[in-house]
Amino acid sequence: PFLYDENRWIEQCIERGVPLLGICQGAQSVARVLGAEVGPKPGEPHEFGYYIIKPTALGRAYFPDALVVAQAHFHEFQVPAGAERLAASEACANQAFKYGGQTFGLQFHAEVTPEGFRRWQNSAWAPYGKPGVQPREEQDRRMARHDAAQHAWFMGFLDNLFGPAIAA
């Protein structure tokens, strides 16, 4: 039931031009509010670990040539009519979109810290053994190698969308 309230809030933010960022399920909610289909892919492949995303031509304004990001999903969104697809991964063509000037959806979890991802790894719902899920050792190796770049990209993205948290 809380999603009905969330959907009304999303609609109001879009209508009023309020900067809006949906992450994972939030991106799926934004896409759904804008009329796109959302749900599991056939065969229910998962992305649980750290995966490379690559920008589209339009996405180069927001992403480097390749970025390794934390993922934890098996649902995906279709890009809503009137939106621009910004990034893709090998398993999921729709990793990021932009609608209008200030609404973004990200399928991945650039906000998650290593500590947060470790909690997911240790959770009862961690989908080890499902199609597409990286083994824990691979996740740990990629986390150690790529978390700092993911964090730097995300902080810059947030500053561009919402403005710097602390004025210089």
Image: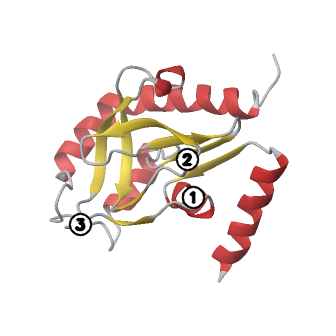
The furthest residue to the front:
81
Residue at x 43% of width, y 20% of height: 64
Tag 1's secondary structure? helix
User: Within 10 Å of the Cα at label 3, are there few (<14), some (14-19), or many (20+) other Cα atoms?
Assistant: few
Name the mark on residue 42.
3
Tag 3's secondary structure? loop
Q: Is residue 60 above or below residue 43?
A: above
* Residue contact at pointers 2 and 1, CB within 8 angstroms: yes
- Horizontal side of 15 relative to 123 (left or right) equals right
Along the line of sight, the residue nearer the viewer: 54 or 14? 14
User: Within 10 Å of the Cα at label 2, are there few (<14), some (14-19), or many (20+) other Cα atoms?
Assistant: many
Q: Residue 8: x and y, percent?
A: 75, 68
Location of mark 1 (residue): 26
Along the line of sight, the residue nearer the viewer: 47 or 75? 75
Q: Of circles 3 and 2, which is in front?
A: 3
Name the mark on residue 105.
2
Q: How is the image coloured?
A: secondary structure
Tag 2's secondary structure? strand
Residue at x 25% of width, y 45% of height: 139
Q: In this view, does 121 lie above or below 6?
A: above
Q: The residue under label 2 is which amino acid type?
A: Gly
Q: The residue under label 1 is which amino acid type?
A: Gly
